[in-house]
Image (cartoon, grey):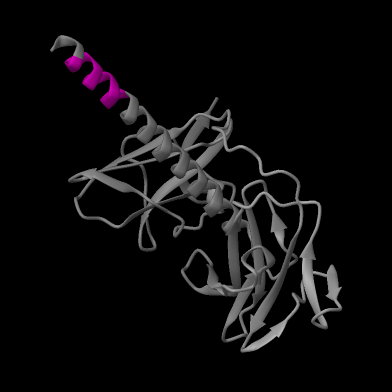
Amino acid sequence: MKRVKILTVSICMFFSAIFAFAAETEGLKSYFYDKIIHEIDHVQAPVITDDYIVFTADSSNRFVGIAFDFENFQTIHPFQILTAYDFDGKEKSSILFYCYERKHNVSSIKYRLVMDGLWTTDPENPVREYDESINLYFSKLNNLGEIATYTKPEENFTRFIYKGEPGLDLKLAGNFTNWDPWIYTMNETYPGSYELSLPLPSGKYYYSYFVGLTQILDNTNPDKEYTPDGRAANILIVN
């Protein structure tokens, strides 16, 4: 009976560790996904990273979709709209984008776009290939290389904590988000207590919390300073 109990506890601990690692990995991937999308501010050639490929299109199109050769062009993936706002919450610009998570270990990808009902090649990608059998051109990405194994980066997680009123839609922003207050939402772990962990590299950071466009300083961190643009913010040093 004791052996059964010990075995049961060991199995539970094993699966708990697996689930915790999976949750942490998904959190990291979500962080890098948000970071990649946030850095795109104009229509451009496909952006290729170890984990993602981001395709962009002009927002003047009513609909843009993408189809890939590894799916035999059977599935059309719709683009999403990405809108950039200034600090006052006014819209600066918008683009359409599709972010493909690299799950197919291929060295090249052929694809076509559907733009307002018309099949076409990607106007932002000059690399094309002609298929004589069907008399069509395809956009192509070459030399993609092997998919990198996803591992935890060397940076440590930095935990942000805020204590306040319960039920807030509390956001985190700083110089690591270019003061965009719409990227990171603080998680209310219990009423009035909010937390979020991010893998920030070493350096000095300015940050604040936001409810809508109202800036709130961190009441758990006494270190405050004016930023170069005259904004009062908390200071965070990551070693």
Residue 54: percent from left, percent from top: 64, 61
Overall secondary structure of the magenta section: helix
Residue 2 visible within the image: yes
Q: Can you tell which quarter of the image residue 17 is in? A: top left
* Residue closest to the far top: 2
Residue at 78 percent across and 74 percent down: it is: 138
Q: 161 or 11: nearer the eye? A: 11
Quick one: quadrant of the C terminus? top right
What stretch of residues is rendered in magenta?
A: 4-13
Residue 31: percent from left, percent from top: 50, 47
Residue 207 horizontal side relative to residue 43, left or right: left
User: Would residue 11 be counted in the magenta stretch?
Assistant: yes
User: Relative to 229, does residue 21 appear above or below in the rendering?
Assistant: above
User: Would residue 8 be counted in the magenta stretch?
Assistant: yes
User: Relative to 159, does residue 32 appear above or below in the rendering?
Assistant: below
Q: 150 or 154: nearer the eye? A: 150
Residue 19 horizontal side relative to residue 72, left or right: left
